Amino acid sequence: MMRFVLDVYHVLNTSCEAHTELFSRAVDEPLRPGEVCGLRLHMLYCRGCRRFRRHLAQMRSLAAMLGRRAISDAGTGLGAGLPAAVRDRLMARLRREAANG
Amino acid sequence: MIDAQDYPAAPTDARDGRADTPAHPAAGGREPREAAAERWVAEYGDVLWRFALARTRSAQAAEEIVQDTMLAAMQGFEAFAGQSSERTWLLGIAAHKVADHFRRSRRRKGHVENDDGTCACEACRRMFTAKGLWRRVGSRWRDPADGTVEKTEQLRALRGCIDALPPGQGEALWMRDVLGVPAPAVCEGMGLTPTGLWTRLHRARLALRTCMEEKIGQKRKGRT
């Protein structure tokens, strides 16, 4: 209980800059209940933090989509297979290697 | 299209035992090394390439990794007794080569790695007043439906912004947020403590937000 109150108090008394760290940490690990509660209270009146949290979530979902999708840029599309030129170089190297034993 | 299964998945997982993997040829008549290598390129070249490219984001590094993997596989061919499928075996080697790549690039960067992030943070510090309050509220980012041109634009913007991050941050964010690699695995791959990774991700996300705000934020009219 003490921990909870201290966490809420602490969150409410730190700057928005410090809050962004909490939002970011929340992505990777669960925050303590007091920290969550403190942030919720803070966000009731802080538009900047509300917006930041939303941006984080949007970036996360875009990033995950980027991971799933083939975004081709300058011929190095993540979804494409081994390019023919690379394959040729690779085969040549392997044959050389095999010839040398 | 990316084979989603190849994605965050660690190279050793159950589906590798699938039936379409041919029985290991070394079990019966021994296949010459050269023939085996050619077969690997044909069968697993694409998978290895995607695996390496997704992790390193560099075609040059991916090519090196695929090549080193094949060479190492030729060396270790006799020792490979077929306990796992060839696919698992090759991906396992590739995972080591990727780790080597990051180790090497860390060493090349030397001490720069230590204060990694400060430069990006400079830009981010302008987000806040001296007291750490928001200097301005971020603009609303539109959330277009999947498959629309606008969504693709946003994805492209994100890609550009990630590439513009300092390398250490970019790598960490790419592994964690884009590929969805679990945090402990990222720590291990990059040789970071959990706190180190967390700090780096935080800086990366702040920088990313600043960059994305410039690229996809709605132009504000008058008052912020």
Image (tube, coloured by chain):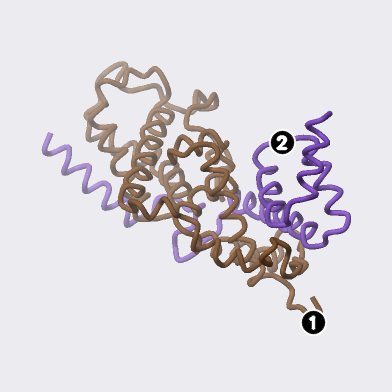
Residue placed at 49% from the left, 58% from the top? A77
B205, above or below A5, in the image: below
- Name the spot of residue B165 as percent of width and height, x first: 50, 60
- Name the spot of residue B184 as percent of width and height, x first: 54, 33
Q: Is residue B131 left or right of residue B56?
A: right
In the figure, what tint was chain A given?
purple
In the figure, what tint was chain B given?
brown
How many labels sit on residues? 2
- Name the spot of residue B86 as percent of width and height, x first: 39, 28
Q: Which numbered dot is residue B221?
A: 1
Chain for numbered disc 1: B
Q: Secondary structure at mark 1?
A: loop
Q: Which residue is mark 2?
A: A30
Furthest residue in direction left, as rendered: A100
Residue type marked 2: Pro
Answer with the quarter of the image where residue B3 lies.
Answer: top right
